[in-house]
Amino acid sequence: MAARLKQKARTRQALVDGASQLLDKGMADPSMEEIAAAADVSRATAYRYFDSAADVVWQVLSDRVLTDIDEAMVRAGSDLIARVLAAEDAINGYLFSDPDGARAYERAMLDRSIRGIGTEFDRAARRLRYIDVALEPVVDQLESSDFRRVRHALALAMGSQAVPAMLDTCRLDVTDARDATRFVCQTIAEEAVRLADRPRGQAHRSTLDG
């Protein structure tokens, strides 16, 4: 039984590794047949482990590791704006270095949702972990509602959804796209600093309110 379980784990990993190799070669939308061939297994075998090629792609991209959060913050120190920009660079720097991979991940996520097999654990929410660490210097100085507002606003500018928004919808190149996401993150961080300096209990009023 143990040998059989180990073989199943090896086969599943072979499929993930095969899909990873295809993605690294620039194949943003590999078929199950191509993934199976890369893993040296049959198409039928591949479908015993994954429901679709999108599921394999999702697994590959979910498993890939970003820069360690502590490493990302080491140079930023306690400066909030520097920390937020370090988080943006760790997340978006990785994603925009492989736009097709980010698009493939989003497509896989949508496919899982449409087919009704998505779960609350599908997205690793890594961006929120990075954002929370970046905001540590002001977390005790912000009202809880302000913290949530800042946290979630930053999440809009970091992550795989930013890739199609910037590159496909806005038709920017990667350099201009990253300039835009950094600008957004810096602006939000500056607002967070202002909110942190405000006396606690004072009604929220954004600098954008005029």
Image: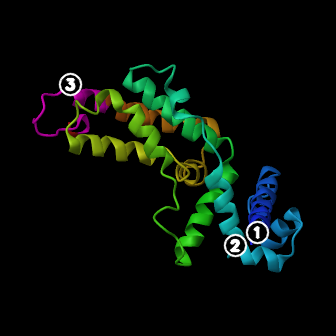
Residues 152 and 9: in front is 9
Give the x, y percent position of residue 163.
Answer: 58, 49
- Residue 80, visible in the rendered structure: yes
Between circles 3 and 2, the one closer to the viewer is: 2
Give the residues drawn in magenta, as a range. Answer: 191-208
Query: Could you say which disc has been placed on residue 197 in the image?
Result: 3
Question: Label 1 sits on what residue type?
Answer: Lys
Q: Amino acid at mark 2?
A: Phe
* Position in image of residue 185 (x %, y %): 43, 35
Which residue position holds label 1?
A: 8
**Label pair 2/1, CB-CB below 8 angstroms:** no
Where in the figure is residue 49, as x and y percent of width and height? 72, 73
- Placement of the N terminus among the 4 image quadrants: bottom right
Position of residue 24 in the picture relative to residue 111 (left or right) = right
The residue beneath circle 2 is 50
What is the distance, in whole Å, between disc 3 and disc 2 at their CAs? 51 Å
Residue 56: image quadrant is bottom right
Q: Quadrant of residue 78?
A: top left
| Mark 3: amino acid | Asp
Distance between mark 3 and mark 1 Cα atoms: 56 Å
Mark 1 nearby-residue class (10 Å; few <14, some 14–19, many ≥20): few
Q: Secondary structure at mark 1?
A: helix
Is 199 colored magenta in this rendering? yes
